[in-house]
Amino acid sequence: MGIFSRLGEIINANISSMLERAEDPIKMIRLMIHEMEDTLTEIKSSAAEVIADRIRIERRLREAKQNASEWEHRAELAISKEREDLAREAVERKLLHESQARDLEKKLASADELVKQYQEDISRLEEKLKGAYRRQKELADKMKHARQRKKVEEKIYQVNTAGAFARFEEYNDRIDRMEADTAVTKMSGGPDLEQKFRDLESESDVEAELARLKKKKKSK
C-alpha cells in the first residue's frame, strides 16, 4: 500500500512532519515523490480524456445549433411557398436540434467544471511536488555535509592519534637509550667501581706510610 491513498491525502499531507517521524527520511521522501509523480501522471491522463470529451461535446453542440438554424431557414422557405406541411416538419426538426443543443450545453458546462477541477488539482499537486523536490535536495545536502564533516573529524582524529603515537615512540626511544647507556656503564665497571678502586689504592698508600713511620720510630 502506498504512502498516500488518494489525492486529498497528498495535498493535505505535512511532509516535514512525516519525515521527522521516519526512520529513513531519504527513503521516505523518495517514496513520496514517486507516488506523487505517479498520481500526477494519472490525473493528467484523466484530465486529457475529459478535455477530449469536452472537445467532442463542443463540436456536437456547434453542429446541433447549425442544424437548428438550417431547419429554421427551411421552415421559413416552406412558409413562403405556402407549404405548411413542410414548414411543420422543418419546425419539428429545428426544435429537436435545439433540444439536443440544450442538453449538450449542460454537458459542456459540466465538462468545463470538471476540467477546471482537474487544472486546480494538477496545479496543487505540482506545487506539492516542487516542495517535495526542495525537501529532497535539502536532505541530500544535509547528508552530504554530514559525510564531509565525518571525514574531516576522522582526519583530525588520525592526525591527533598519529602525533600521540609519535610522541610515545619518542619516549620509548629515550627510555631504550637510557637503558642501553646503563648497560654499557655496567659492562665497563662504571665510574663508581673505578672510584672504589682508587679509594682502596689511596688507603693502601696511607697505611704503608704509617707503617714506615712506626718502624722508623722503633728503630730509634
Image (cartoon, rainbow, N blue to C red):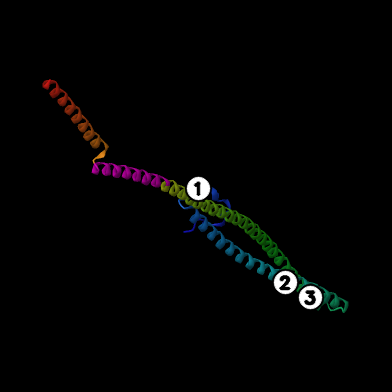
**Closer mark to the observer between disc 3 and disc 2:** 2
Identify the main secondary structure in magenta. helix
Tag 2–tag 1 contact (CB < 8 Å): no
**Looking at the image, which residue is at 14% across and 20% down?**
217
Q: Which mark is residue 59?
A: 2
> In the figure, is residue 78 to the left or right of 109?
right
> Element at badge 3?
helix
Of 50 and 159, the residue lying toward us: 159
Q: What element does badge 2 sit on?
A: helix
| SS at badge 1 | helix
Question: What whole-number distance in Å separates the C-alpha atoms at marks 1 and 3?
Answer: 72 Å
Measure the alpha-carbon separation of dots 2 and 1: 52 Å
Is 171 colored magenta in this rendering?
Answer: yes
Query: In this figure, which residue is indicated by the disc labeled 1?
Result: 20
The residue at which mark 3 appears reads as 90
What is the span of residues highlighted in magenta in the rendered image?
163-188
Q: Give the residue at x 18% y 27%.
A: 209
The image shows residue 20 at horizontal and vertical percentages of 50, 47
- Which residue is drawn at the image coordinates 53% and 54% (left, top)? 140
Quadrant showing the C terminus:
top left
Does residue 8 appear in the picture of this structure? no
Q: Residues within 10 Å of mark 1 (few under 14, many from 20)?
A: few
Residue 37 showing in the rendered view: yes
Identify which residue, 133 or 120, lies in the foreground: 133
Identified by mark 3, the residue type is Ala
Label whose residue precedes the other's in the sequence (1 or 3): 1
- Residue shown at the point (56%, 57%) measured from the top left: 7
**Residue 92 point in image, percent of width and height:** 76, 73
Q: Residue furthest right?
A: 80
